[in-house]
Image: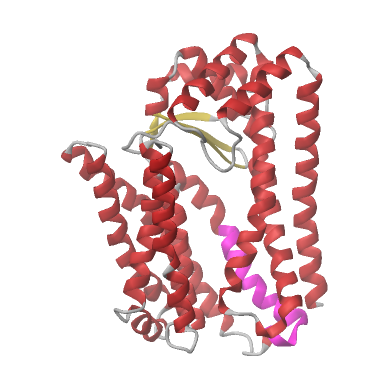
Amino acid sequence: MPRFLSLAAAMFLCLLVLEEELWLGPACREVQAFLLLLPWAWSWRWVRICDRGGFPREAGIPTLLLLPVFLYSLFMIPAGGGRWLVGLNQQSPFLATWAGLAPFLWILAASHWGESALLGVPSGRRRRFVARQLVGQFLVMIPFSLVTQVHAWGRSLFPENAELEGGWPYLAVLALEVLPILLILPPVVMLLPKALGAVPGTSLWQQVVARMWRGRGRPPRVQDWDPGVALPNALALAVGPWRRILVSRSLQGMLRIEEMEAVLAHELSHLERRHGRSLLLGFLGAILLADIGLRWLWGSSLPWYWAWLPLVLAAFPFLLASRVFEMEADLDAAARDPSLEAGLVGALTLLGRRTQAIGFRHFSPSRRVAEIEWAGREPHRRAYWQRRAKLCRGIMRGLFLAGLAGLLGETL
């Protein structure tokens, strides 16, 4: 996922260049000063990882996320890439998007190659790994570049001051910006397994999932996740009736059968309770509310970097709800069967020896093991986490509705 976060950051920088022309105006020095913080953040993260004896996967995150974006910004500022892109954007936004991100893909290819070399991946497999990652990122870029072209065509149908007039003209412009994004989200999510290196899984795990599935419709398909590097992780994806569970081969090699069954039960809980939908709605609503609040506080005097602030502010409820949902999924999996509880504790204990924290969206493995054992002794503890998860679902849906209401109230 750091690679796709890095790609998203590069897309954001490219759009800032094309829409705001920041690399040409007086704000150029502010942009340069902001981007100079990236290598410092990268170095600080490396020091923290070395101090605690981090896992190679964690050590790769700052390189995959921050360093490519910093190198891309060097292309945009000193090399004059931003000035060239603005001229190309006047002719074709579609071509400008691809031309603007092509250098970043070369930077990512070098990053993938260096990462696989450091991890000792054989040269033949290394080429396949880099090619697969680039193909996946191309698949993600295609719909977004089409959206930029459709957006440019649609904006030409309305007067230039439609955004300032408010009312229905503003809503029409906003619809042209938002609706294409909503339309491409489902196919992008459905392309993610292929982009992440998923291949058909074994029938054993598919039978386990079919036996434990309690949701509506057909049980999700289980696929082997082969990212090409050591990555012990599992991921649940869903778009309506389309459901997938990706399990990395390194995780399958680490765990016993009963531990793998517990991991699958954990991912099934995410799909059955639709945690992903609640997180997405809440995140979008929080972005809308943060955007409205910032514009209400500063008005038209907002600095250029305000565009990052709604994302940062919206991340707080997203991360808090994610932790509660992860704990609820743990306790749901443990409650299915006593053997699954022991398997989940074993899996988390093993992962806890490899890394102190699986990610920002999770509690530490030791905390999760303690909560699972506590809920096994006292059932009211599981009910407590279920109440917290229900409250988080309500808050995330409330944020979405409040964001929509605030947007309509601001424009009508």
Looking at the picture, tell me which residue is in the foreground, 376 or 367. 367
| Residue 406 visible in this rendered orientation of the protein | yes
Q: Quadrant of residue 79?
A: bottom left
Residue 338 percent across, percent down from the top left: 64, 9
Q: Residue furthest top?
A: 339
Looking at the picture, tell me which residue is in the foreground, 276 or 379. 379
77 versus 185 height, above or below: below
For the record, the magenta segment spans 163-183
Q: Indicate left or right for 371 with 190 as reference.
A: right
Q: Is most of the magenta stretch helix, strand or loop?
A: helix
230 versus 183 height, above or below: above
Q: Indicate left or right for 126 with 367 as reference.
A: left
Q: Quadrant of residue 78?
A: bottom left
Q: Residue at horizontal 56%, vertical 51%?
A: 186
Which quadrant: the C terminus? bottom right
Q: Residue furthest left?
A: 123
Looking at the picture, tell me which residue is in the foreground, 223 or 278. 278
Residue 169 is covered by the magenta coloring: yes
Residue 35 percent across, percent down from the top left: 43, 70
Residue 256 is covered by the magenta coloring: no
Q: Residue at horizontal 43%, vertical 87%?
A: 24
Residue 182 percent across, percent down from the top left: 60, 59
Q: Residue at horizontal 32%, vertical 73%?
A: 75
Q: Quadrant of residue 401?
A: bottom right
